[in-house]
Image (tube, helix red, strand yellow):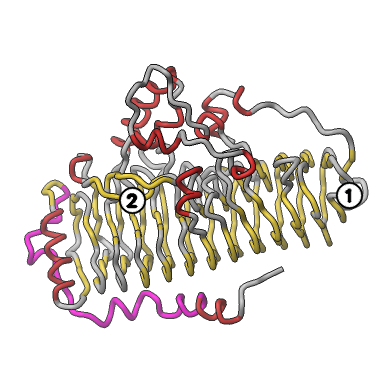
Amino acid sequence: MRTLSSRRRRVLAGLALGALAPVVRAAALFDVGRFGARGDGATLATAAIQRTIDAAAQEGGGVVVFAPGAYLTGAIFVKSGVTLRVDRGVTLLGSRDIAHYPVLPTRIAGIELAWPAALVNIVDGQGAAIVGEGTIDGDGKVFWDSYWTLRRAYEPRGLRWASDYDAGRPRLLQVFRSSDVRIGGGLLLRRSGFWTLHICYSSDVVVDGVTIRNNEDGHGPSTDGIDIDSSRRILVANADIAVNDDALVMKAGRDSDGLRVARPTEDVVVRDCIVRAGAAGFTFGSETSGGFRNIEAYNIRVEGKVPVGILFKSAHTRGGWGENLRLHDFTLVDVPVVLRATMNWNPAYSYARIPAEVKEPPAHWKVLATPVPRAQGMARFRHVRIWNVKASGAATAFEVDGYAEQPMRDFSFDALDIEARRGGHIEDAAGWQFARTRLRLGEPVAVKDAASVTGLPSGSYRVGAPRPRQDPSTKSYAEQDKT
């Protein structure tokens, strides 16, 4: 099995050393108040903040600062060499007017398209930073409500899959086609209209010290925490996350468009994080098309409002792969499912079918509906190591469903300590090996093939015929979203 080389480990470790503070201390200060920004929470400050950022950039870099207060703003763009410092007592408050977020090329949920900018953006930048102990607040409920209004109209037409793409909600922070970026230092990120922190087509990014709270003022749909998307050399550390979708998630493109782009997410370290609410603690997918390589996550705590601890999810049209993935030192407390792998995730969202009555569909609908041959659409996961996982109060230990003709291969598990009411099932696996594993189960794990799974403790599993599988497309939209 390939692992991170010593050089790659040094590079990733080096990203964290002094990543935030030296940038903040070194450069000249540019006060937004001198450029006309008012922190009264009511006066739109977008233009004044942007003038300040631009002035710092024109001087070769600098630190943009704010007097205490709440600054109402639309999308702003942090330029190369500029640090946006949001100190304690400062709030950047997102405008509720979608017109204040210009539509620009980006990637959203796995496909390239034009989309509203995020509240705070680093696009085509180098050496930029967003740091401080203040708050970036998307005030996103208006965008959550607009999504549900659209979805209620779309569902009867069979357009659940189009809802996320047509709603046009702003993310909170976007890092796009950028490098040498620093984010954190105690930031509070809250009430994002869509994904919270999206790192896409970027490299050498450090996120260290963020708190994400999206379940305030309601529960926003698709309010992911930190999405690392077709990017490389990324470090995420000391994140405290409560969201209403994936918390810490690796992504790499969707279906035909993701296969066209074919950019992996690779050389990523995620460590010392806590997930208090979300769809899963640590996730690969469902956008798997570009693949994952050399991902390590450790010292992750996941708590009981999160339904799944470790999640692999893809769909029959995604394709892609994952290899040399290492997850260790996870603590799961009252998390219902310890490990889930599903290769047919959320069919109503995953499979785009344009209704016959739609004669001139939008261009992105055509992209989403482009067929992918079955052989190309099967995601392939192999060489995965999972060790030192302690789970208490679980309902189910394993829920593993893949492809019979393309099983998930060569997973090794060591030092698992799992307490669960049910063992669950492991199907479509090959070369799964367990060592030093302790399972305290009310019901044993159902294993389809004894030769495919070895090392489970005696009495903790049973081998038998494949269990009947429920077609997930027969579930309600709400039930599909939950899984």
For disc 1, the marked residue is: 451
For marks 2 and 1, give the CA distance: 46 Å
Residue 253, placed above or below residue 358: below
Image coordinates of residue 281 in percent, x first then y, are: 57, 51
Tell me: 156 left or right of 135.
right
Residue 150 visible, this angle: yes
Q: Residue at x 63, y 28 (%)?
A: 472
User: Which of the 4 image quadrants contains residue 134?
Assistant: bottom left
The C terminus: image quadrant: top right
Q: Residue at x 62, y 39 (%)?
A: 374
Image coordinates of residue 193 in percent, x first then y, are: 33, 42
User: Which labelled disc corresponds to residue 106?
Assistant: 2
User: Which of the 4 image quadrants contains residue 377?
Assistant: top right
User: Which labelled disc corresponds to residue 353?
Assistant: none
Circles 2, 1 touching at the beta carbon (< 8 Å) = no
The N terminus: image quadrant: bottom right
SS at circle 2: strand
Q: What's drawn in magenta, residue-wise?
A: 12-41
Residue 309 visible, this angle: no
Say which amino acid is labelled 1: Ala
SS at circle 1: loop
Say which amino acid is labelled 2: Thr
Tell me: 183 left or right of 402.
left
Q: Is residue 462 magenta?
A: no
Crowd class of label 2 (few under 14; some 14 to 19; many from 20; radius 10 Å): some
Q: Nearer the viewer, residue 244 or 481?
A: 481
Q: Is residue 36 magenta?
A: yes
Image coordinates of residue 423 in percent, x first then y, are: 79, 42
